[in-house]
Image (cartoon, rainbow, N blue to C red):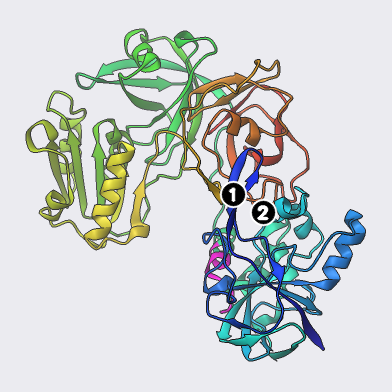
Amino acid sequence: MARLVSLNVGLPKDVAWQDRTVHTGIFKYPVEGPRLVRRLNVDGDGQGDLGGHGGENRAVLVYQRESYEHWRRFLGRDDLEDGQFGENFTVDGLPDDEVHIGDRYRIGEAEFEVTQPRVTCFRVGMRLGEPRMPSLLVAHHRPGFYLRVITEGHVEAGDEIVRTRAGRHELSVAAIDALLYLPDRDPEVLRKALDIPALSPGWQGSFRDLLAAPAPRVQRGFRPLRVTRVVPESSTVTSIHLAADSPLPRAEPGQYVTLRVPGAGDPAPVRSYSLSAAPSEREYRISVKRDGVVSSYLQTQLAPGAVLDVAGPRGDFVLTDDERPVVLVSAGIGVTPVLAMLHALAASGSPREVRWVHTARTAAEQAFAAEAHALLAGLRHGREHVFLTADTGRLSLSSLSTLDLPVDADVYLCGPDAFMTAMRTAFVSLGFDASRVHSELFGGVPAINPGLVGVTRTPPHAPPGAPGNGPAVTFARSGLTVPWSEGYPSLLEFAEACDVPTRWSCRTGVCHTCVTPVLSGSVSYDPDPLEPAAEGEALICCARPREDVVLDL
C-alpha cells in the first residue's frame, strides 16, 4: 500500500542566484499534523512562478522516497531530505513508471487526479546545488508528477494512498515525460496522450505542436545577392531589390531576411528586414527606413550591381491560409510585412474580406500608398483606412471602433512596440479573439526568464571585461557582434552578459525553450542535449561556438 510519508509546504521567497534574484516556492519543508488541501494548493504553501507551476492542474507536486534513494546513490549525496525536490507530498510507492496520467487517488479526506509530469526547470537544480538536475530527472525517468484536487480535504503524513480510478490508455508519468522531452517519439502514442482528458492543457498543446506538420526548411548561411534596383518610396523609405543567378528560397508572406553589410562598419553589421513584395523565387525586395548608420548606408551608398550577403527568409509572422477575414494593421515602416501579405492576397484573387488599417505621420512619409491602394482595388472585398497622425492624432480604440471591422478576422499588427501593445489591447477590447491577433517584432524577441525579479533591461552591449579572442558571435536581432570568451560556459550566459534578451527554463538542454535559429556557423554542446535541436537551430543553454556564428537573437 502506498503511503504519504511527508507533507511539505513553503511560501515563495526571493533567493539570490548567480548575481540575480529568483522568486521561487521550491523551498518546501515537512510539517506535522493535518493540512487542508484546497483547489490551488496546500494550506501554508504557494508557488512563485504561476506561469510554470501552480494553478488547478498543478496544485500539488508528488515525489517518491525511492527516487530519493536513487539520487543519493547516483549523486553520492547523504544530505537529501523530504521536500528538497520541491514536492508537497513525499510518498512511499507511486513510481513514475507505474502511475498513469488520469489516475485518481484518495489520500486522507481528499481525492486527486494525476495531470502531468513535473515541469523541467532550473530551480530544482538551484535548490539542490546541482545544475544538471533538470536533465537528469528526465534522463533517469524520475520526474515526479502533479495532482489536481478533485475533492478538497485534510491530509497528513501517514495517510494511506488508495487508487480510485485508472487513467485512460494507462500511459505512465515516465512515458508521457519521455514523449515530450526525448527523441524518437511515436506519433500514435502522441495521439493517445491527447485523448487523455486529465492531461493538462499545456502538455496537450505541446503534443499538438509535435504532431503538426514540420516547419518548412530555411536556407542556412549567407548567400551573395546582387542589388538590381534602389527605389525611393517616400521621404524616409527606400526599397532595395535583390536577385541571384539561381532560384531563391521562396518566402511566406510576412517573413524577413537578414543582411550582412560589410561597407557599413567593422565588424560587418547584421540587420534583419521584412520582405515587402509578393513572394518570389526570382527577387527579394526589402524596404528600409533611414534611422541609423546601416540604413543610411543602404539608402545612400548602394547602387545596382552591388553585392550583399543575405540569409534566407524566416519568421513565424506569416499569413494563414484560411477563409477568415483579414485585418492588416501597420504603422510607419511596419507596413512592409503586411504589404507582402496584401500582395499575396491580391495575387491569388482572394475572396476573403481584407481591411488595411495604416498610420503614418504625414502623406510625404507614407510609403507604398499608391501600391497598397491598387492592390486593395483589385480585391473584391478590400478596403483601406489610412490615418495621418499629424492631422488626426494616433490610431486608438475609439477610431478603430468606427471602422466596423469584422470581429471574426485574423489580425496582423506591425509597427513600434508601443503601437502593437496598444493595438492588441484595443482589438481584444473590441471582441477580437486574442489568439488571432498576431504581432511582428523587429527587434529582440520577448525574454522568457522564469522567476527572475528586479531585472533591468538595457540595450545590448559587449560583455564586461577584456574582449575575448574566440569566434565572432553575432546577435542578429540585437545588432551586436562580439568575440567569444572562453570564460562563459554557454552562449546563453554569454548573451546574458551582453544584455541580449534570452529565453530559457531548464538551462540544461531539456525543455527547448532556448532554441534559437542559427543563420550561419556551427556550435558544439556540453552537456549534450537529451534531444538535439532541429537542423539550423541551437539550444544555446548548453552550446558553444565552433566558429563564427550568427544567431537570430
Q: Is residue 16 magenta?
A: no
Amino acid type of the residue that numbered disc 2 sits on in the rendered structure: Arg
Observer-nearest of 300 and 265: 265
What residue sits 30% from the left and 40% below the top?
418
What residue sits 54% from the left and 37% below the top?
218
What residue sits 57% from the left and 67% below the top?
46
What residue sits 58% from the left and 60% below the top?
12
- Where residue 156 sits in the image (x, y, percent)? 70, 84
536 relative position to 371: left or right: right
- Which residue position holds label 1? 22
Residue 123, label in figure: 2
Residue 248, label in figure: none
Note whether residue 331 is visible: yes
Residue range (magenta): 197-205
Amino acid type of the residue that numbered disc 1 sits on in the rendered structure: Val
25 relative position to 97: left or right: left
Observer-nearest of 207 and 220: 207
Marks 2 and 1 in Cβ contact (< 8 Å): yes
Observer-nearest of 124 and 319: 124
